[in-house]
Image: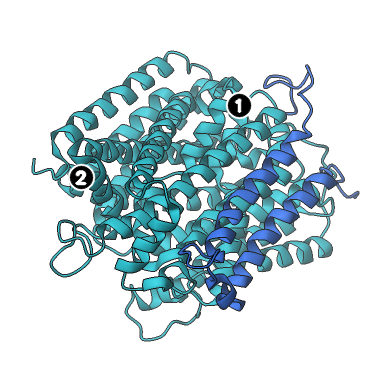
Amino acid sequence: MSVNTESSSLRKRDTYLAAVAIASGFIFLAMWYLTPAFLEKPLWPGASLTVAFLLGTLSVFIPVLVAWFIAAADKPATAEETFETSHH
Amino acid sequence: MNHPTGNIAIVLFFLVIAATLAITYWAQKRSKSTAELYAAGGKIKPWQNGWAIAGDLLSASTFLGGAGMFFSAGFDSTIYTFGPLIGFVVMLAYIAGPMRRLGRFTFVDAAATRLSPVPIRIVGAVSALAVTLMYLIGQMLGAGGLIEILFGIPYNIAVVIIGALMVIYVAFGGMLATTWVQVTKAFILTGGMTFVAFLCLAETGFSMDLLYARASEVHALGASLFLPGGMKLSSIEATSLLLAFVLGIPGMPHILMRFFTVPDATSARRSLVIGMSVVGVVYYLVFFIIAPAGVAFLANNPDFMAPGGGVPGGSNMVALHLARYLGGDALLGLMAAAAFATILAVVAGLTVAAASSISHDLYSKVIARDNPSEARERMIFRVSSVVIGAIAIMLGIAFEGQNILFLTGLVFAIAASACFPILVMTMFWSRLTTAGAVAGGFTGLILSVGLIVAGPSVWVQILGHATPIFPLSQPTIISAPAAFIVMIAVSLLTRENTAPAVQPAS
């Protein structure tokens, strides 16, 4: 009885980049609860926009940017990998 | 019909129906084979699939519910933006490529390639059905109420209209029709949101600072509107909610199915990046511009406030009242039609996934032992879509007026606790056994459902008990790790009876 080893391998680059996106979300969430006074600070004197707004904006766009970075290294599919011929 | 959104909305309502039926008629002629019915023959282009993925996630609750949530809870609601986007990154990094290479029509195909297929298909299909049906019922309930408000159509009739249309799209047009309905809706929604956000900023001379200052001035929360705490989630509940999005999005069966509509793994990944970019932009427009503008321009505005406080029709109507404030009845009608198109597209996508689970995973692979005729499988798919439509209509009518917010939490909790662990462990852990996958999958499924029922959302708010058995409203922080732990433990204690080679999911 052998163990099935037909599993996929993780791409290191993807894994690290995904970790950045995941960490950004949980760090933002942690700051939300641990440092509300910091988040409350205006971005410039007298501004209504706060650090929370800036971090919120980053929290939306960091995952999108990370995704573009991840996909940027993708190579075009090989000719034999089509809907009809890939491992179905 | 007494329709508060005006005649333009009614005209656009029928235009949306006519356009989507025309798409279905066109797609029906191109959906003859099983592969075409389930996966549009794998011929969808990455940009098209990307917009369809965006359409799958951007429901009416994104812009109506999002603006409404911000109106009452403020900036705290932004957890609903970055959570799903991180989930997309996880999906891109770990799931999309292997899923496209291993599977054919459903995500269970990919999970079943390494292990004993029948038990894996049963647990996978049950989990997928639980996710899609509960999501569908939630959408139907919201949609019935929304259409009643928007167009003056009685709730029951609205639910029947939506149910009938979604069955027609799916049964006749299959994945091709559903894809193009999604693409069309995503274009309308993104264009509409961009236009409304532009008008919002134009009102304040394109100054975000002024917009936020006006919102702070008029809202009861004042400057706290842009600070944590509005949703009254504990830090553990917020973490659990974020975890539900991060692990739940990559386990959503109706989004996973989209990877089979493109020719190869690279296209699947590219389409996901396009889709999440569209989602990110729409989220930002809704939560960071439109929702604060809703507060700034509507709160304390006597023309838009109900006598008892709040906006007429409830906070979910904030975005539509804002549209009327900015562009009169014409813009209101446009946004109402966009909401209707959004509802139709989302329920169609869910119906395809649910019907596929029945016809492909359960009937074709389990009951017929992988040996049905293609014609029979297609017939089962169509019958399944009718049955699912009927169930959705019946439950939609039966639960009218019920508080179903817990369903949304449950959907993501099940996807994160049952579908995602099975998928990711099948793909990446070579020691996983069938017994481990089944035990872990059912643990995640049972725990996520059980803890939601025992939690405050159902046990207290619906069943009327004084205190919940389980203190958290979101159980993923418990149920997902438990699923992984059980999966690993049982796998280490068991061995496969056979050493299956990778079995093609034909």
Residue in the picture at 41% in, 85% down: B467
Residue in the picture at 82% in, 50% down: B497
Chain B is shown in which shade?
A: cyan
Where's the C terminus of chain B, which quadrant?
A: top right
Where's the N terminus of chain B, which quadrant?
A: top left
Q: Amino acid at mark 2?
A: Leu
Q: Which mark is residue A86?
A: none
Q: Residue B241, position in %: x, y?
A: 54, 65
Q: Residue furthest front?
A: A45
Mark 1 neighbour density, 10 Å: few (under 14) some (14–19) many (20 or more)? many
Q: Separation of disc 1 and disc 2 at Cα?
A: 34 Å
- The residue labelled by disc 1 is B46
Residue in the picture at 72% in, 35% down: B102
Question: Circle 2 sits in a helix, a strand or a loop, which is it?
Answer: helix
Chain A is shown in which shade?
A: blue
Q: Amino acid at mark 1?
A: Pro
Q: Which mark is residue B150?
A: 2
Total count of labels: 2
Pointer 2 indicates a residue of which chain? B
Residue sitting nearer the eye, B102 or A11: A11
Question: Circle 1 sits in a helix, a strand or a loop, which is it?
Answer: helix
Q: Residue B308, position in %: x, y?
A: 15, 70
Q: Are marks 1 and 2 in contact (CB under 8 Å)?
A: no
Residue sitting nearer the eye, B360 or B136: B136
Residue B387 in sight in this render: no
Q: Residue furthest left?
A: B1
